[in-house]
Image (cartoon, rainbow, N blue to C red):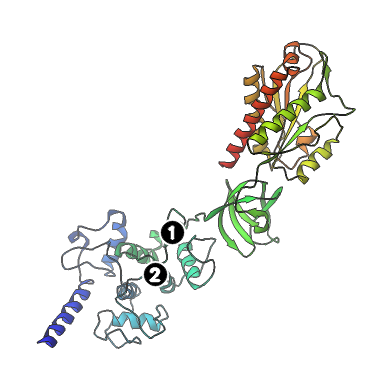
Amino acid sequence: MLRRKVSLMLLLSVMVMSSVFAGRSMAEMQDIPSKFSEEIEYLLKLEVITGYPDSTFKPDRNVTREEAATMIGRALKLDGEKRETSFNDVNAASYASGYIQSAYEKGIINGYGDGSFYPSKDITRGEMAFLISKAFKLEKTGVISFKDVAKTGAQSEAINKLTTAGIADGYPDGTYKPDAKISRSEFSLLVARGLNSEFRVEATLKPIGERFVNTTALNVRSGPDVSYDKVGQVSLGNKLLLYQTIGDWAYISYGSLKGYVHTAYLSESSSQRIISIDAGHGGDDNGASGNGLLEKEINLAVALKLRNKLEDEGIKVVMPRTTDVFVELNDRVQYSVQNKADTFLSIHTNSFSGDSAHGTETYYYTSSLRSEESKQLATFVNNRLYKAWGTLNRGVKVEAYRVIAYNPLPAALVELGFISNKDDSMKLGSNQYRDIAAEAICQGILDYYEWKESK
């Protein structure tokens, strides 16, 4: 009696498994996801997949290894005649035995080290990648990487091929989830894409992290070696999106710029903000003078106040001069670079032949490497300063002043006001207004860093 019950259960099991592939039209099935309906209808017409006896498709049910082998076998029109297989746990009477053996003989599927196939085990997304890539003979790889997939190895290569072909993709968080189970609807989608390129999607490259440039100017190349052409440059402190590492090289993007950079010049965390505050003139060079004031003294007084305020905000400040000494223009730039500044701001006081000119203006230079950042720095500083001081906004302008034109850093030069104008000079000589200027410039610099780090 017990033997009879066991035999009956085995028969029912075979019938149920066979019913997975029993013919059902899409019109008879009410549970097919609408977003996959076109692909599933395509496979139904080819009789690659079918529904269940109760007229359902069961889209969310996990796919087993034998079901996957059968679907692939039907898609490739392999010999599905039931027969003995090379695996010790696949019964010759199983509905999937013929497809499993045919796929094995063609090198599409493999078993486990113990000679088993584990036909009833749910297939994972990683195993699926092996199966699909071999079934459809995918060879092309691309610059694709996922946070939870090893950078090298057979599984990584299979997943890369599958994604490059536009058959599979990862998740929005940059993962692939290779150990996750795969549903009938998902697997059907992949098989349809394998058979028909019209269903395929463009391979999307998802970032797996962020990196920061730790050198003054970093070349971006078209390939992972110095022999490849330069396609652009990124500056010190820029935040890059990282997609993949290949040896000592990383594939990154910065805005619309994409390419390869050497990993030696990347840091995992943003380095401390370091700005060079250059007090214009000094020593024998008084700069402009008027209304009993000297430009070199105004510049230094505001620069020192600004240094204290920036340091209170956690920004490191380096200064080419902190006393009444003369420093060559080129040396001011060189000092800033050598002290690893990521930004440069020069403070000056304006002058005119008469009393009529007045107001605040700020300059930058249109270098292809750093023009956008320099312009933003100048704009943020200028807008804060003229409003805080209540002066005329003379605007942000372009000029080839040496300390900003021949500077590898994002750089700007601010003219506080006109020493030759009575109203401006009253503010320039006032300790209170100098403090207001320093605070305004400080806030402008903070605006700039916030903008830069949000890119």
* Residue 217 relative to residue 69: left or right: right
C-alpha separation, residue under disc 2 versus residue under disc 1: 13 Å
Question: Which amino acid type corresponds to the residue marked 1 in the rendered image?
Answer: Gly
**Residue 128: which numbered mark, if any?**
2
- Label 1 residue SS: loop
In terms of image quadrants, where is residue 181? bottom left
Say above or below: 22 vs 104.
above
Q: Residue at x 71, y 47 (%)?
A: 216
Q: Position of residue 329 (x, y in %)?
A: 83, 35
Q: Nearer the viewer, residue 384 or 355?
A: 384
Report the side of 246 relative to 300 (left or right).
left
As rendered, which of 4 and 23 lies closer to the eye? 4
Q: Amino acid at mark 2?
A: Met
User: What SS does tag 2 mark?
Assistant: helix
Quadrant showing the N terminus: bottom left
Packing grade of label 2 (10 A; few <14, some 14-19, many >=20) is many
Instruction: Please tell me the numbered disc located at residue 219.
Output: none
Quadrant in which residue 420 is drawn = top right
| Residue 73 falls in image quadrant | bottom left
What is the crowding at mark 1: few (fewer than 14 residues within 10 Å), some, or many (at least 20)? many
- On the rendered structure, is 362 left or right of 92? right
Residue position marked by numbered label 1 in the rendering: 170
Left or right: 95 as drawn, with respect to 404: left
Residue 34 vertical position relative to residue 131 in the rendered view, above or below: above
Q: Quadrant of the C terminus?
A: top right
